[in-house]
Amino acid sequence: MSTAATNYGGSASAIAYHYDVGRAFYALWLDDTLSYSCALWPDASAGGELRDAQLAKIRLHLDAAHVQEGSNVLDIGCGWGALLQLACLERRAARATGLTLSHDQFDYVSALGLPHADVRLEHWADHEPEARYDSIVSVGAFEHFASPEDSDTQKIALYADFFRRCRDWLTPDGRLSLQTIAYGTMKRSEASAFINNEIFPSADLPTFEEIVKSTQDLFEITSVVNHRLHYARTLECWARNLAKRREQAVQLVGEAVTSRYERYLKQSAIGFHMGKIGLLRLALRPITGRWKHDARW
């Protein structure tokens, strides 16, 4: 891992602490796509199945990133590969690259045998594409980029580095679709010590203001929506699923881990309901007039 990647949040050890608990455990309470991020419900308060809502979320991002037949796609934080699957099999992307720091996710996606797909155990700060991408999607990774120890200035500089790389990786007509949890009415100093220490270590949420500042001269934000109630409902659905299979969960990961996740799911749902945290979905267009010529492309 490069020096830049080492200095950024979302380290391999921090990711492994949460995501490598075990796929069998997550499969007990996620839907069968293993999508572990906010779904897109037809109505945030009622109606719809979890799997359908997760597929709707993925298609929203594929549309926002203009993924179509022949596209070259990058998925930053690809999880267990649900978006890569739809990009390859439904949208017929010419190439789809997924980045993850989770060994479990890497092994699982690699074994799917997706056509024209390449999954890499790699930090985004180490990524060096062979050609420009038509589309970049990142769902649920951005909130891991910064660390609680980073100052506001350091966070913005880190985010700007990410957006600068994405801008340089995209074709002139390319698009970026981003989904991230963000601070809402809650101040950074009020963040839950339980979440920061026992659920997502070495991670800190962005604010919308920080995202706007870090995209300056790099991307135009063409759309943004706060779907916090969609995430509240997703978390409540996961919590119900885990409650139904609690005995199996304890057999897999033990009482302590199961209880920790129960608390995390319920506490997070309350936070979204209250607006303390939000769920931002952004579509972005690169500002190409400032590009410098790169002989590789």
Image (cartoon, helix red, strand yellow):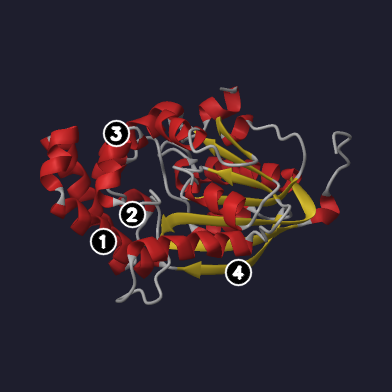
In this rendering, the answer to whether 39 lies above or below 37 is below
Q: Nearer the viewer, residue 112 or 75?
A: 112
Q: Indicate the amino acid at tag 2.
A: Asp
Q: Distance between the residues labelled 1 and 2?
A: 10 Å
The percent coordinates of residue 115 (x first, y second) are 61, 42
Query: Which residue is label 4 attached to?
Result: 223
Q: Which callout, 2 or 3, points at the residue further toward the start of the chain?
A: 3
Where disc 3 sits, the SS reads loop
Where disc 2 sits, the SS reads loop
Q: Distance between the residues labelled 4 and 3?
A: 35 Å
Please report the residue visible at 34 percent of the width from the left and 40 percent of the height from the top: 200
Camera-side mark, 4 or 2: 2
Query: Which residue is label 3 attached to?
Result: 21
Question: How many C-alpha atoms fall within 10 Å of the one at disc 2: few (<14), some, or many (≥20)?
Answer: some
Q: Which of 284 and 136 is in front in this view?
A: 136
Query: Which residue is label 2 attached to?
Result: 31
Please report the residue visible at 37 percent of the width from the left and 56 percent of the height from the top: 187
The percent coordinates of residue 81 (x first, y second) are 49, 44
Q: Would you say 211 lies left or right of 147 here?
A: right
